[in-house]
Structures are given as structure tokens and as C-alpha cells.
Amino acid sequence: MNGHFGTLLTSGIENLVAEFNPPTSTMGQNEEDKLHLQAGFQKKKGLRDGIDAADQLWMSIGSTQVAMPRGSSSHNIRQKDINALSQLGGDVEVLRQPGPKRDQVRRLCEVLAEGVGPKKYSAQDGELLILLLGHFAWFSHSHAREIIEFGGHTAIVDWLRTDRFKGQSNPLDDTLAFPLHRACLSALASICRHGIDTSNHLLELDGVELALEFATHLEAGVRCAALRLLARLIPYAAKRHPQKDSLPLHIMWPILLAELQSGDELLRTVAAACSLEAIATACVPVDGNVSQNLALALLHALELATASDSSATALPLLIAVNRMAADEDEGICTAMRNNENLIPLLTLPCTMPIFQDPTVATDWLPKATKPMAVATAKASGLSAACTLRLLSEAGAALDGSELAPLLRYGTSIRAEIQLQEACQAAIESAVHREQDAGLLIQMLTNRWKSESPPGICGYSVMIRVAQRATAIIKQDPDQASEAWLELLEHSIDTVLLDLADSKDMLEVLEELRSVTRKIISIRNGELEDEVEGEDAPDEREEEDPEEGERVATS
């Protein structure tokens, strides 16, 4: 089924790419335009539908990724042409993507209802009809509404619940219904992808209970399709009845926790999407061990996604980690913040044995700044940086190995502005609490050594690091050492003079070097001897008049 998904929609891939790659001029206007946030992840349906396609060559699942063109030249051009032609009274149908007419959708829904009822079509017949409707619903909101209008969603649920293909004399015959079940659940998920107006119709048919029922199926593809449907329904189910338990959490969370640790990447991804929706809608139980187990499961899945270089899998996990760390409930946020693996996983290279290629970046900050990085990789890096900023501002301790990548990518010319700002904010909070001047000096000097030539966009945050190091050494002179002075001597010569704040950077480094050298000289006695040598002539000059008086008197 999924093998034909990309083929049937090839003509619309360019429009789909444009959908989740909006014009640069509109980025940052609101949360829905920021892919690293939960609202943006929901709005950019094409990225969430990377979960829908098991074909690893199509929508960024696995190591193969789609490079997304930047700019606005191709964004929504066809729809603009349709609107302009419509105003002029032209035939807009020539510009529309080929697809079924309204009567054709109606007839397909009628045939589907007849097949599960009196005509008793085979499982393969039902699968074919449902696949067609599912593809139409996925591609077009208007088609999804037409399917609901003509009762197609009800017929799909009837096919899913029929007992005609269960309990066969030969148990192997039961497996013939598995593709049918996958098609039904995938079609329902495609109908729900368009928002609350289509999802509410599935909620009226107990769509959440249906998804959870098949989420424990023996066949992995059926479980994946069920979780796709569940991810679509969770936010609307929670809003539908906010005053009561609209989601059976005692059933849902054990399923999600198990699939987050699955060996199948696609299952981990759909479980991550479900977990993100549940966290965002406050559906994490505050009692019991669910919070602790969820934090462990999310970080385990994130480590696997990082090692396999799958940004489509990592993105919902990173957003879920961020939302959980920022949760208002103390028990939920503490479960994530107190995990000792969180900060190293966001800043240090992955050490999992399944990762074999040493030439590929293994954490999301460098992945986000690679040339031609895809949008999901950039959003993953930004989400990781935002989580580090949150943790740093909350008082988390960051050591030198964790601060170094933040400084590198917070000042990199290859990092986008939002990533630079998030990294710099995390650094400033950590540096303000830092008491080790040597660590700060090493951070600065290593930054100039990290690239050749050093691709530094500005020195503002590095200036604050140097100022903090100067203040620490003034307060605690014992931290001044010959090693730090030698590093500073070399670094001053490597400051790029063509940057706007290079003069300020040089002045701060000169002050830091001067303070360090003076303290070392005093400690070694060199400065005291120099002072004594300068004071001696003055003393002799004061004694000369007295000597002259004694000589005159005698």
C-alpha cells in the first residue's frame, strides 16, 4: 500500500514541499510558523505526514532526506493562479490537480457501504476502495469533507469492525484482513489530518477507542496506522470534553511507552507524535511512575533517532522533551529535567554502537548547521537549543564540554538567527553562574581553534564570557595561571578585525590578559622588585638635604 503512496502523489510533492516551507518573509510571525514548536509541527502537515509514509525514499523517514528549497518563488503559485483566473472568469479546472469529481466520490462511498453490507465484498475489494478514498482524503481537505458528507467514514469504520474476516477455520486466513485493517486506519488518519472539522466526525464514532483497540495488534503495520490515527485525534478529544476523562490514559500510556522503545523506527515516530500531543494537551498523569517512564522512553527513542540521523523521527521527540521540561506540573518537568542523560544527549556526540560513520554529525546542533540541511534537521537543532536554554535558565549546571558546542553554534555564520539566539541565551545564563575562570578562557580560545578559518558571525556573547572570566580572576587571583595567559596571548592575534564588535573584543581580551599577567607577576615577586627599584632613587633624594646640613654644620 505505502509503496504506491509516493507514486500516486508525485504530481503534488512540489506543492507539499512548499506547504511546509513557507516564504522566508512570513517566518517568525507566530508560533504556527515556527517548526521547532508544537504548533508549527502540527500546522506543517506535510512533515507530520512523513510519519504516514513508510516508504523511506519519500518523506524523510530514515537516513534519506528531502532537501527543501528556500525562498518564496514556488510557494502556493498554483493556487494564486487559480484565484486570478477565477476572477477573470476563466476555466480554473485546467489548473487543478487531476482528481475525482464530487459524483465519483459519492459513488465510491456508496459502493463501499454496499460492499460491507449486503453485497459482502472480499477483504481485497474493500482494501482497494478504501485506499482510493484514503489517498483522496489525504491530498485534499475538500475531498475529505465530501467523503464524510457521503458517509464514507462510517463505511470505513464498518469495514474495520466487521467480523466476516475473523475466526477463519485456517488461522492464516485471518491475516488476509491485515492489509484491510491498515487501509481503514490509514484512511481515517488521512481524513483527520485536516483539523477539528473532520476529526470530530471520527470522535463521534468512538475513534479514540477504535485506534487504541488496534494499537495492540500483532501486525506492526496495523499498530502504526492505529497510532497515526490516535495522534490526529488526541488534541481534539481532549478539547471535546475537557471536564472529564475523554482519553483512557490507563490504556493509552502503556501502549505509547512500549512503542517508544520499539525496534521499528516508524513505530517510534508515531508513538513520539502521540506522546507530543498528549503532553501538549496535559494528558500525562501526575501520579504514578508515568512521568519518569515517559522521560526515559523519550530520551531512549531520541538517542536512536540521533544515531540513525533521522530528523523526521527526532523532531517530535525533541519538541516533546521541550514541552515536558517546561510543563507547569512540577512532577512532570522534574522527571525530565533531573534525567542525567538529557543535557549530554543534546550537546555531545552520540556514543551508541549502532552508529558507525564517524564523518557524520551525531548531535542536532551541528546537524542543523550543515550546508543544505533539511527543514526538519534545522528545526530539530533549534528545538534542542531551546531546551538547553530552558534548562540553563532554570539553573542546570553545564560543564565545559556542554558549553563549547553552544558557543560554537551560537556564534557560527552557518547557524540561523533563531539558533544563534537560543544558544547565546543558554550560554549567558550558565556563564553568569560560572566560578571557574579557566573553563571560560578555554571556551574562548577553543572557539577560535574550532574552525579554519573561524566562521564567527559576531563577538557579543564571547565578550560577555571574557568579562565574566576577568571578574572571576579579580575576585579569586589564585585562578590566574601561566597556561591561561599563554592561551590569551595566542587568541588576541586571531581576532577577526572585520567584524563590527571586534574592537570591543580586543579591548576585553587585553584587559583579561593584563589582569592575569599582573596577578602572576605579583605572585612571582617580579612586580614588587620593579616597584622597589623605582622607589629607591626617591628615597636617596630625600636623604641628600639632611646630609648636606650635617656637612655644613660640621
Image (spheres, grey):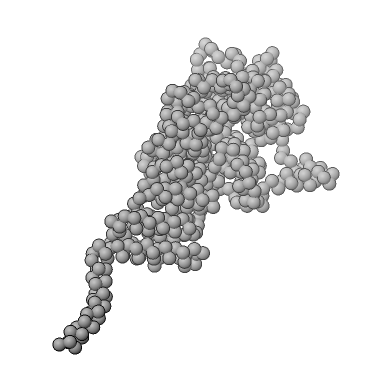
Which residue: 23% across, 70% down? 529
Which residue: 51% across, 13% down? 170
Q: Residue 229 appears in which quarter of the rendering? A: top right
Q: x and y percent of residue 253 in the render?
A: 49, 24
Q: x and y percent of residue 364 in the render?
A: 46, 45
Left or right of 95 on screen, residue 433: left
Q: x and y percent of residue 461 in the render?
A: 46, 55
Q: Residue 177 appears in which quarter of the rendering? A: top right
Q: Nearer the viewer, residue 480 or 77?
A: 480
Left or right of 523 on screen, residue 389: right
The image shows a total of numbered marks equal to: 0
Query: If the image is split into quadrants, where does the C terminus sit?
Result: bottom left
Question: Residue 70, relative to residue 159: is it above or below?
Answer: below
Q: Is residue 144 visible?
A: yes
Question: Residue 210, relative to residue 373: is it above or below?
Answer: above
Q: Nearer the viewer, residue 443 or 189?
A: 443
Q: x and y percent of residue 281 in the render?
A: 56, 30
Which residue: 62% across, 51% down? 24
Question: Residue 377, relative to residue 546: is it above or below?
Answer: above
Which residue: 26% across, 78% down? 538
